[in-house]
Amino acid sequence: MQESNFDRITVNPMQMGGVPCVRGLRIPVATVLRMVVNGMGEGAILADMPGLVLEDIRECLRFAAESALEREMALRRRA
């Protein structure tokens, strides 16, 4: 992925194995995305993760969307 406009997403090889995290916190973007996918609303996520703010969740979603555009994935064709 090329340089981007994600001010709230950080990658530090010395933290959390270098996975993208929210604002240098030990909260991986993937954790926030899983919460959304599992049906948690923004309010529930913020209650569960007090260090986050609403814009963090929204930037995680933008990051995921941008990441999906950057990668090729082999998907199984349905019969």
Image (tube, helix red, strand yellow):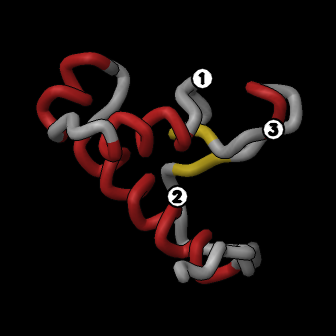
Give x and y (percent) for residue 1. 75, 73
Q: Which residue is drawn at 60% across and 23% down?
A: 26
- Occupied quadrant, residue 18: top right
Label 3 environment density (alpha carbons within 10 Å; few <14, some 14–19, many ≥20): few
Q: Circle 1 is placed at which residue position?
A: 26
Q: Distance between the residues labelled 3 and 1?
A: 11 Å
Relative to residue 24, is residue 15 drawn left or right? right
The amino acid sitting under disc 2 is: Asp
The amino acid sitting under disc 3 is: Gly
The amino acid sitting under disc 1 is: Arg
Which badge, 1 or 2, comes first in the chain's sequence?
2
Relative to residue 36, is residue 71 drawn left or right? right
Q: Circle 2 is placed at which residue position?
A: 7
**Residue with the most extreme front position:** 79
- Between 78 and 16, the one lying in front of the other is 78
Which badge, 3 or 1, comes first in the chain's sequence?
3
Q: Residue at x 42, y 66 (%)?
A: 62
Of circles 3 and 2, which is in front?
A: 3
Relative to residue 16, is residue 32 drawn left or right? left
The quarter in which the C terminus is drawn is: bottom right
- Occupied quadrant, residue 16: top right
Quick check: 42 above or below 50?
Answer: below
Q: Circle 3 is placed at which residue position?
A: 18
